[in-house]
Image (cartoon, coloured by chain):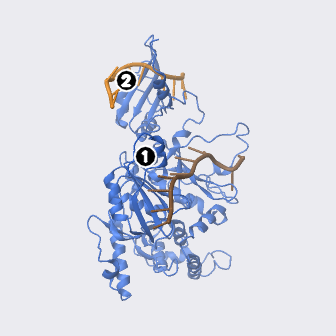
Chain colours: A blue, B orange, C brown
DNA sequence: CGACGGGACGC
DNA sequence: CGACGGGACGC
């Protein structure tokens, strides 16, 4: 019984999954391959933790199977993509390189082999649209498709969805680098029907851009203009309209603003939209925009009122032709938009600057200076080490201070001393202004993974109503070492979890009693959970 | 072509 | 005042 080991140890080994997920390779190779050969060819992709060339226990014969464990998921994914089909030096047999299944899953041969490396399961806010989800993940690479799970009858977003990439490496970058609130997991392959797989199919599966009565794009675009495939069918799309209705909460009279916006644009485009006939050939919008005087910049910087949603702002700016993207940081109210031509951008600026949306809250729209352009997250994500995604939604220091100065200017114009209202609290070097909070806060810090041990838990109450979790996350992550912050469903109280006591105490110090997004926050140390009591019945309770 | 070793002494 | 969240693909 040389192989004996205690039951619990064996049991644990079988239960244990590879961590991080998908960081171990399973390689089919010739029986001549040695550990040194693998070391030489595979170490360039990252930190190898273990190489195991499998040998028969009795005969010690090489079985032509090797496992390589990397420290990171993305390292394993890149090694697989690069080395699959290649040969080791002086060995003719090409390698077959796959992501290893966990020991528990065993050696079941899966027809959808790479399925499990390409698709992520993510938790999303219930207000999210597919576009919102896509925008959050396309910085990591080429997205094949995104989907949200909705209630069959009500159509309500159930709060989770899927993102499928074309490349395992890109999926891995997203898995490692996306905002931790998405709680990304590699999706289990979708359960498949046994029969009729080839006959009964959902056209949206094969054509992610497919809309009823609208089918010209086939696959969604691979990194080009992200609206191309979706746009045409939008107004027919039930779920999209629903998302916008949801987003109306907290935006007040924005529907009126919306109507005003549409009619103004139609007038400018010769009024031929209103009659239901579309654009005429001779005086369409593109003709007008071609001649429009521009500053030469295709990008706009927008300051929007807090509470305005990503979906609403995008819809507003998409009224002007040529919108490539419109990205709003909902927490700070700062947005950037890009148009296909500088004429379009300048036209949008002129028409939408000062536009009250909702009424009483003018947008500030300016051409974005190319020099102030934030770093290109896409290229950062694709460079092997640049996982610089922040929980804090961009919204840099310059923007925050800029917004503060603008607020001061508006107050001054209204005959009010800005120092009296704003308390003279200028942003310093270590802090920045944010749209939702009257005091400057430290810059955003990266959140920590969901399974990080909690050092301190805080209890949060938002009076009078709940504060959007995006705003809470933006505020609480700024103390550093934030693991999670959430409110209980349909409640105005919740919890924040920190990995260090110092960060948690800083949160109490800075945020307790503070006005955040229009709510008064109470932030105190949380009592131990009921579960903690249950699990530690022998410990004396402290008062 | 296709799947799981070796290490190790801890409160 | 207010105390413990949500998770698998419209069948």
Which label sits in the foreground, 2 or 1?
Answer: 1
Vertical placement of residue A83 versus A241, above or below: above
To which chain does the residue with label 1 belong? A
State the residue position of label 2. A35
Q: Nearer the viewer, residue A489 or A116?
A: A489
Contact check, label 2 and label 1, Cβ < 8 Å: no
In the rendered structure, the answer to whether residue A448 lies left or right of residue A320 reads left
Residue A371 seen from this side: no
Q: Nearer the viewer, residue B9 or A276?
A: B9
Asked if residue B7 is positioned above or below residue A528 in the image, the reply reads: above
* First in residue order: circle 2 vs circle 1: 2
How far apart marks 2 and 1 lie (CA) works out to 28 Å
The image shows residue A42 at horizontal and vertical percentages of 38, 32
Pinpoint residue A18: horizontal percent, then vertical percent. Answer: 46, 34
Q: Which SS class for mark 2?
A: helix
Quarter where residue A525 is shown: bottom left
Mark 2 packing: few (<14 Cα in 10 Å), some, or many (20+)? some
| Image point (47%, 57%), residue name | A486
Residue A274 vertical position relative to residue A532 in the rendered view, above or below: below
Q: Quadrant of residue A55?
A: top left
| Spot occupied by residue A536 in the image (x, y as percentages of width and height) | 44, 41
> Which residue in the protein does label 1 denote?
A176
Q: Pinpoint the chain carrying mark 2.
A: A
Q: Looking at the picture, tell me which residue is in the foreground, A437 or A329.
A: A437
Q: Secondary structure at mark 1?
A: helix
């Amino acid at each position: 019984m040389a192989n004996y080991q205690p039951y619990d140890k064996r049991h644990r080994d079988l239960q244990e999954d590879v961590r991080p997920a998908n960081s171990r390779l399973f390689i089919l190779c010739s029986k001549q391959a040695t550990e040194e050969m693998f070391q030489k060819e595979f170490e360039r992709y990252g930190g190898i933790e273990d190489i195991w060339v499998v040998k028969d226990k009795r005969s010690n014969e090489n079985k032509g199977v090797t496992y390589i464990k990397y420290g990171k998921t993305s390292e394993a994914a890149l090694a697989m993509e690069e080395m699959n089909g290649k040969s080791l030096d002086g060995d003719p047999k090409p390698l077959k390189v796959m992501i290893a299944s966990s020991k528990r899953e065993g050696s079941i041969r899966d027809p959808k082999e790479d399925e499990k490396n390409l698709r992520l399961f993510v938790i999303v806010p219930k207000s999210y649209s597919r576009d919102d989800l896509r925008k959050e993940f396309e910085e990591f690479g080429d997205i094949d498709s995104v989907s949200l799970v909705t209630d069959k009858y009500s159509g309500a977003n159930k709060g989770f969805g899927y993102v499928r990439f074309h490349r395992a490496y890109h999926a891995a970058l997203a898995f490692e680098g996306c905002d931790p609130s998405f709680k990304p997991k590699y999706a289990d392959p979708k359960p498949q029907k046994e029969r009729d797989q080839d006959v009964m199919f959902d056209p949206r599966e094969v054509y992610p851009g497919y809309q009823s009565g609208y089918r010209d794009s086939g696959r969604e675009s691979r990194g080009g203009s992200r609206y191309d495939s979706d746009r045409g069918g939008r107004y027919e799309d039930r779920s999209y309209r629903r998302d916008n209705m949801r987003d109306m909460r907290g935006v007040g009279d924005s529907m009126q603003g919306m109507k005003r916006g549409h009619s103004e644009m139609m007038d400018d485009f010769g009024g031929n939209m209103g009659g239901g006939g579309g654009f005429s050939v001779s005086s369409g919008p593109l003709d007008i925009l071609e001649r429009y005087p521009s500053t030469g910049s295709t990008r706009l910087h927008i300051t929007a009122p807090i509470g305005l949603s990503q979906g609403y702002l995008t819809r507003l700016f998409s009224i002007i032709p040529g919108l490539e993207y419109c990205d709003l940081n909902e927490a700070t109210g700062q947005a950037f938009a890009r148009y296909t031509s500088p004429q379009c951008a300048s036209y949008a600026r002129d028409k939408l600057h000062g536009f009250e949306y909702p009424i009483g809250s003018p947008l500030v729209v300016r051409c974005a200076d190319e020099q102030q352009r934030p770093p290109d997250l896409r290229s950062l994500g694709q460079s092997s080490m640049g996982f610089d995604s922040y929980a804090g939604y961009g919204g840099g220091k310059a923007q925050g201070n800029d917004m503060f100065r603008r607020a001061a200017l508006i107050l001054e114009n209204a005959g009010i001393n800005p120092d009296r209202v704003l308390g003279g609290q200028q942003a310093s070097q270590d802090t920045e202004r944010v749209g939702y909070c009257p005091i400057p806060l430290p810059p955003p810090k990266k959140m920590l993974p969901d399974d990080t041990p909690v050092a301190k838990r805080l209890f949060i109450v938002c009076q009078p109503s709940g504060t959007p979790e995006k705003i809470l996350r933006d505020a609480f992550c700024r103390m550093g070492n934030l693991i999670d912050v959430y409110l209980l469903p349909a409640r105005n109280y919740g919890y924040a979890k920190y990995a260090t006591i110092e960060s948690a105490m800083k949160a109490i110090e800075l945020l307790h009693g503070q006005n955040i997004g229009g709510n008064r926050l109470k932030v105190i140390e949380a009592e131990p959970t009921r579960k903690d009591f249950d699990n530690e019945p022998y410990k004396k309770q402290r008062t």
